[in-house]
Image (spheres, rainbow, N blue to C red):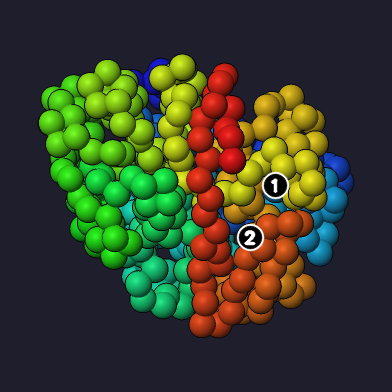
Amino acid sequence: MPHTPPAPRCNRRLVLAAVAATCALPLAARAAAKPLLIGQSAPLTGPMAGPLLGVLGGQKIAFDEINRKGGIGGRPIELLMLDDAFDPKRTLENARTLVEQKEVISLFGTVGTAQTAAVLPYIAEKRMPLIAAYSGSPALRERHHPTFFTTQASYADELVRMVRNLKAIQSTRLAVVYQNNEFGKLLLPLAERIIQAEGATVAVARPLEVSGADAVATAQAVAAARPQAVIMVVAGPAVLPYVKANRAWVGAPVYTFSLSLGTMILKALGDDARGLAVSRATPYPWRATNPLARNFAQLMQREDRPVDYDHYAGYINGRVLIEGLKAAGKNPTPESLVQGMEKLGRLDLGGYELNFSPTNHHGSNFVEITVVGPNGNFIR
């Protein structure tokens, strides 16, 4: 399991990052302009806190950038963050606090499928927008929700791209290793349906404990089925031991989701990450010909940080929220922000396009496959 900073320190760093979102504005301007309050519930403590640092850092970079330019209509964005420790009950409690006590004009960036699902009935009742969620679960997208907007492709889109890529290289006998929790059990039948629909077969499907403690036994069971490739429906700490066990016992290539291989886990895997195929719902952040990626690279240089997918995902989500706020009128309200998001239509952030409308709140189905090369670099 990759090293996670001690909870108090991690929490302090993230809270400081959140409340600093208005610091880029001159003091006089901050005093004169009422901030646009945005609320976010996120796991600032617990096992998911460390892997999420880059994503939350990317959001802050987006908000700092617009605030340095004077904010939106002269008003800075201020992000209020509350810790839910990846507990859906606390996510809903935090949403109530942010909406009813802090009077935010929008919620932003919930983390996790169950956590996001927990707030959807509440925000529908309150007509409160939620822009972006760090979950690609199709269950969150099955029915049109009046105030919920996503910015990335679903896990179904990622699975289709994985299976089609494997079929193109004549790998049709596939194993599925799925996390033994709500996340994995929800996606297993989806993976089985997509594999069958694309003309491939499931050689074996094996659960993996959330801790990854049974990684070796799981890999041995997978090896006995002799698959041509493994689709790993796993996130968090279990990724590390299973990838190592798969290399030792199975030998077949592993395909996995974008959320499975963040910067923290990539570093912890070291050379064991080489050859991993990762479906990406975020565009390639090192593409020098792309205006969005070039601007992002300059901002990361300003922060003295290396470019990575985690920060880029958070940055893009922040940019989408900013565009929605711009479209919401002079004095954005929850209602006008929903209308503004729906009016965006085709949104080009600079070489990366999304599309929103009154009948389409899910802005992107972009997915591409990348492979981890030498030194942890991604190859397209």
Q: Callout 1, which amino acid? A: Ala
Would residue 226 be found to the left or right of residue 362 on screen? left
Residue drawn 24% across and 26% down? 250
Please, is residue 120 above or below residue 21 in the view?
below
Residue placed furthest toward the bottom: 358
Question: Disc 1 marks which residue?
Answer: 62
Would residue 230 be found to the left or right of residue 58 on screen? left
Are there few (<14), some (14-19), or many (20+) residues within 10 Å of tag 2?
A: many
Give percent across and percent down for residue 319. 68, 55
Q: Are marks 2 and 1 in contact (CB under 8 Å)?
A: yes
Give percent across and percent down for residue 307. 67, 32
Q: Report the Cα–Cα distance between label 2 and label 1.
A: 10 Å
Would residue 235 be found to the left or right of residue 107 on screen? left
Question: Disc 2 marks which residue?
Answer: 321
Label annotation for residue 127:
none
Are there few (<14), some (14-19), or many (20+) residues within 10 Å of tag 1?
A: many
Give percent across and percent down for residue 54. 56, 34
Q: Residue 138 or 204: which is nearer the viewer?
A: 204
Mark 2 secondary-structure assignment: helix
Please identify the quadrant where the N terminus is shown.
top left
Please, is residue 287 above or below residue 122 in the view?
above
Does residue 186 appear in this view?
no
Q: Residue 355 or 129: which is nearer the viewer?
A: 355
Residue drawn 61% across and 71% down? 355
